[in-house]
Image: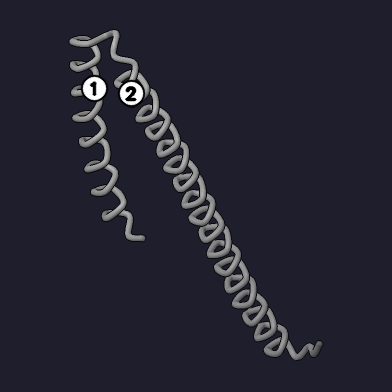
Amino acid sequence: MNKYINCALDLEYNNDVLLVTSMLKKWSEAKPNNEELQEVVKAFMNIVFYTNKVTMERYGYNKYCSDARDERNRAILRARSAEEQIEKLQEQLKLAKYEL
């Protein structure tokens, strides 16, 4: 997915989490003995931690792919440079009347 879309979705997600978390905190402080509310808070926090884990895994995967792409591109550039150097040396050998 596009990195700008991911960034916008992450920002929207974080804003929503902050809103829900602040509301749950306010409600929990108003009714600290409400067991159902405490279960909802715990379940929501589990969802947040799971989503954070998945987000970090996505970041790691994207970083790995980016690093692999960069490494491949560097290898291609080195190979092209080596081929150009070989061609130049072969031309020099031909000019000096040496054959391989």
Mark 1–mark 2 distance (CA, rounded to whole Å): 6 Å
Q: Residue 88, how many percent across, how many down?
A: 62, 80
Left/right of residue 50 with respect to residue 85 in the rendered view: left
Q: Is residue 7 above or below residue 46?
A: below
Quadrant including the C terminus: bottom right
Element assignment for label 2: helix
Badge 1 crowding class, 10 Å Cα cut-off, few under 14, some 14 to 19, many 20 or more, is some
Q: Disc 1 or 2, which lies upstream in sequence?
A: 1
Q: Is residue 8 above or below residue 33?
A: below
Quadrant including the N terminus: bottom left
Q: Is residue 25 above or below residue 60?
A: above
Q: Residue 16, how many percent across, how many down?
A: 22, 36
Rendering quarter of residue 71: bottom right
Please give the name of the residue rendered at 39% of the width and 29% of the height, measured from the top-left corner.
43
Amino acid type assigned to the residue bearing label 2 in the image: Val
Residue 11 image label: none
Element assignment for label 1: helix
| Residue on which disc 1 sits | 24
| Residue on which disc 2 sits | 41
Tally of numbered discs:
2
Pointers 1 and 2 in contact (C-beta within 8 Å): yes
